[in-house]
Amino acid sequence: MSKEVFDRGLEIRKNVLGSEFVEASLRNADAFNMPMQELVTEYCWGAVWGREELPHKTRSMLNLAMIATLNRPHELKMHIRGALRNGVSKEEIREIFMQVAIYAGVPAGVDAFRLANEVFKAEEK
């Protein structure tokens, strides 16, 4: 593992998902799942999110569409929060999920809207 890429990934991951969430994920990792935490931090967040060709806001928007299409509710809620941190507006999130409904199916769009509302309500508290 490249320490430089891992450290860059850790910084980006904390900025997008929140330091508290990321630190808890690492703190709660055990011998079984720590290799996955390290892989995600270095490969996903450091090697890909760390590239400068797309801004983080755009990457967040792409992730919302792909994760909604894949029907991964836990990851989708996490990335909706991250998208808001990256400057994606509620209106933009709505339009992403409208697009998902057309191209990935109405049930995927409906679920995405439901999860987004849960996140929006939780973030308002």
Image (cartoon, rainbow, N blue to C red):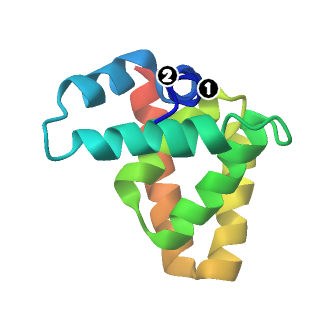
Q: CA distance from mark 2 to mark 1?
A: 11 Å
On-image quarter of the C terminus: top left
Give the image quarter of residue 55.
top right
Q: Nearer the viewer, residue 40 or 17?
A: 40
Secondary structure under tag 2 reads helix
Residue at (34% x, 39% y) in the render: 37
Q: Residue visible at 42% across and 17% down? A: 19
Which quadrant of the figure has residue 9? top right
On the image, the x and y values in percent for residue 80 come to 54, 42
Residue 80 is at least partly visible in this image: no
Question: How many C-alpha atoms fall within 10 Å of the one at disc 1: few (<14), some, or many (≥20)?
Answer: some
Q: Which residue is mark 2?
A: 14
Q: Residue at 29% of width from left, 43% of height from top? A: 35
Q: Earlier in the sequence, mark 2 or mark 1?
A: 2
Q: Is residue 87 visible?
A: yes
Look at mark 1 in the image and give the residue it sits on.
Answer: 85
Residue lying farthest to the right in this orientation: 53
User: In the image shown, does 60 or 103 lie closer to the viewer?
Assistant: 60
